Image (cartoon, helix red, strand yellow):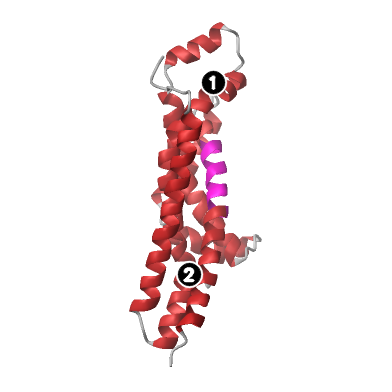
Amino acid sequence: MIDWAGYLTLILGGAWVTVKLTVLGCALALCAAFIAGLGRLSRFAMIRSATVAYIEFFRGTSVLVQLFWAYFVLPLLGVPLSPMQAGILALGLNVGAYGAEVVRGAILAIPRAQLEACVAINLSRWQRMRHVILPQAIVLMLPTFGNNAIELLKGTAVVSLIAISDMTFEAQVVRTQTGNTAIPFLTILILYFALSGTITLGIRGLERRLSAGLDVTKG
C-alpha cells in the first residue's frame, strides 16, 4: 500500500524550499530592479549603458540557460555556487531585469509638476526622490511587482534541473517511486496556486496601505 501521507510530507518539504527560493529570489530581484531602474535614469551615460546591457541581456536570454551558467560555468571562472545560491542568483537577476523597467516607468509617470515644485523649494535630487517621487512611484510599481513575484515563484520549477529539492523535484520523486503522475502533480498544482494567491493578497493589502492619502494622478 502506498504511503501517501509520507509522500505528502515529502512534497511539503519541497514546498518550503520553493518558498525560500521565492522569498530570497524576490529580495535579490527587488534590489536589482531598483538599482537598474534608477541607473536607467542616471545623468551618466556609462551607468545608463551598463544598466541597459544588464536589462537586455537577462530579458533576452532563457532563465534556464542563465541557471546553468550560474551553476555549471561560474565555478569554472572561480565563483563556486551551491545549487540554492545559483537558483537565487539566476531567478533574482532575471526577474530584476523586468522589474527595472517597472521602476523606471513608474518614476517617469509621476507628474512633472511635482518635480518642478521640488526644484522650486530647493530640494536636492536625493531629497526629491526619497520624499516625493518614490513614495508615489512605489504604489504604481506594486501590481506589476506582484506579477513578477508570481512569475518568479513559477520559475522556481526550473531549479529541479540542478537537483534542488523543491516541490517540483519532490513530485518527480513521488511519481518515480509510486508510478502515479496525477496525484503528486495535482498536489503541487494546488500548492503553486495557493502560494500565488498568498502573494496576490499580500500585494493588494500593501497597495491599499501605501496608497492611503496618495493620488499620483494629480499634478
Number of disc labels: 2
As drawn, which residue projects farthest toward the bottom? Answer: 1
Q: Earlier in the sequence, mark 1 or mark 2?
A: 1
Nearer to the camera, 192 or 35:
192
- Badge 1: how crowded within 10 Å, few (<14), some, or many (20+)? some
Q: Residue 26 lies in magenta, yes or no?
A: yes
Measured from the top left, where is residue 67 in percent x and y? 50, 61
Q: Position of residue 77 (x, y in %)?
A: 62, 60
x, y percent for residue 38: 53, 31
Q: What type is the residue that disc 2 sits on?
A: Met
- Secondary structure category for the residue under label 2: helix
Could you tell whether 213 is left or right of 217 in the image?
right
Residue hosting label 1: 132
The quarter of the displayed image where residue 189 is located: bottom left
Q: Identify the residue at image location x=44%, y=65%.
A: 157
Region rendered in magenta:
24-36
Is residue 8 in view?
Answer: yes
The numbered mark at residue 207 is none
Is residue 58 something one can see in this rendering?
Answer: no
Between the residue at mark 1 and the residue at mark 2, the CA separation in whole angstroms equals 42 Å
Q: Residue at x 42, y 55 (%)?
A: 196
Q: Residue at x 45, y 53 (%)?
A: 198
Q: Secondary structure at mark 1?
A: helix
Q: Which residue is mark 2?
A: 167
Nearer to the camera, 1 or 122: 1
Residue 148 drawn in magenta: no
Residue type at mark 1: give it: Val
Left or right relative to 25: residue 216: left
| Structural crowding at the residue carrying mark 2, measured as other residues with C-alpha within 10 Å and reported as few (<14), some (14–19) or many (≥20) | many
